[in-house]
Image (cartoon, helix red, strand yellow):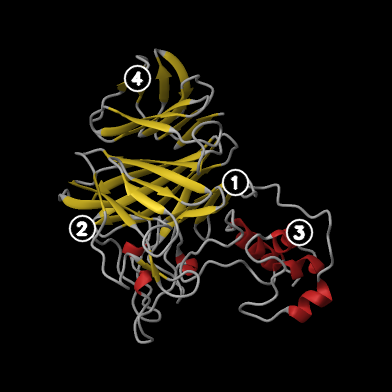
Amino acid sequence: MRSSLFHSIMDWSLSLRLPNGNRAPIADSPLRNQNGPAIFTYFGAEDYLYWDWASNPSDPYKVKGGFELFIQHLAYVETMESAGPPEWKNRFFVDGGMATFRSGWAKDDRVLILMGENGSARKTVHDHTDGTSFIMAAYGELLLTDTGYYKPNQFQNAVTAGAGSHNVILVDGDEVPEKGLLSNWGDADAFIENTLDGTAIAYAESRQNYPNTKVVRGVAFLRERYFVVVDRLESQDGVEREYRFRLHAYAGYDLDGNVSLGEHGPLIERDSGSVAVYTQASQGVAVVEEPAFKIYSAPHVHKLVKNAEHHTVTDSVVTGIAPDFLSILAPFKTGESGGPDGPFEVTQISTDHGVAWYIMGEDTMDIAWLRESGAPTELVLPTNETLNTDAAFVWMSLDKSLALMVEGTVLSLDDQTVLTSSEEETVAVKQ
């Protein structure tokens, strides 16, 4: 109980806390908070474990669930009036493979969890084929979800364990090997790499090799307000295939909230929080659609609270040779029409062999630009300014105070240099 290893495990669990108090439902986990971490404060762990237990909006002072720990809490947990949330927010668990981004610990904060598990962290009975998947919550609501643990009967694997039940890129409707029985783990190792922590800009990548495609999924957390998902794909055989950018909304069908399909992606609306998603591919035009629905079957089925239910699933679909995808996840407080928590205005900028978005907030104007091989080095902006870079991906505020560059050496605006980097640096930042 006094071991730093156990205390680190409690920290990892806390890093998965969503704004509504539940832990993120990764792998076979349902939507629930934890029972027991507060006991570790008696054995030298940080006081914020008591804060998590006592302040949890989902199930405060929880002593049951998994283990019945009423006596242990009574014996070891003392009231800590001064206990508060951790000072840390973003956490990068590189060895096991997980990156967590958060703006804070309050109900209205934004959270995204990116998966990239490898080795023994991946090879567990309850694991899913979910390398590079992510979960996102904001303004008190889970908005983009994993699907939990649903088995039609005791003789089958959970139908929610397959790749199609997660927020991943699907290639010809599939990707890495399916999960088998017992120690036939399925999936493939993924790796969290090129991490960058910061308040205005945070970044991490999850890398995984599919049978015929290398996938590098980057996530940028910007201004602690919105997320950019950067999917860079590389074909290993030059064959044209169908690619799907899949999302699972925690809304629609049996759930509260609504999902509507727009030109570039879904708008997911729940009582207190919503997210507008904008996705486009570097080759052709990605078409937004919902896969075929079959009751109690993947990908629409989930089991996260009690009984199996259904939710809305969306795909952005394109056929090509390993096209890249660039997606803006723009959360906002439901009912707000402006202000710091209102919706963003996101507009696509025309470019070849790439994708570019113009993102306008209340007092901010940002550019996100993804370039594949053969892309021009110049991008003409809606403001008639010209952006110039040799990078694979750049994000920049138009006042030039903030910038992020991935696999590039220079970023400039109207011939004024904003950011430079050596070829040895994968990620460069100005903040």
- Mark 4 burial class by Cα count in 10 Å: few <14, some 14-19, many 20+: few
Vertical placement of residue 201 versus 91, above or below: above
Distance from the alpha carbon under mark 4 to that under mark 1: 32 Å
Vertical placement of residue 375 versus 146, above or below: above
Which of marks 2 and 4 precedes in the sequence? 2
Image spot of residue 14 (x, y percent): 63, 59
Q: What is the number of the mark on residue 108?
A: 1
Residue that numbered label 4 is attached to: 382
Instruction: Look at the image and tell me in which quarter the N terminus lies.
Output: bottom right
Amino acid type at image mark 4: Pro
Vertical placement of residue 163 versus 104, above or below: below
Which of marks 2 and 1 precedes in the sequence? 1
Which of marks 1 and 4 precedes in the sequence? 1
**Foreground label between 1 and 2:** 1
- Mark 2 burial class by Cα count in 10 Å: few <14, some 14-19, many 20+: few
Decide which of 318, 323 is in the foreground and name it. 318
Vertical placement of residue 22 versus 270, above or below: below
Q: Is residue 209 left or right of residue 98?
A: left
Residue that numbered label 2 is attached to: 172
Distance from the alpha carbon under mark 3 to that under mark 2: 47 Å
Q: Is residue 363 left or right of residue 4?
A: left
Image spot of residue 108 (x, y percent): 59, 46
Decide which of 418, 163 is in the foreground and name it. 163
Image spot of residue 160 (x, y percent): 37, 70
Residue situated furthest bottom in the rendering? 155
Q: What is the number of the mark on residue 46?
A: 3
Which of marks 1 and 3 precedes in the sequence? 3
Distance from the alpha carbon under mark 4 to that under mark 3: 49 Å
Residue in view at x 58 percent, y 62 percent:
22
Amino acid type at image mark 1: Asp
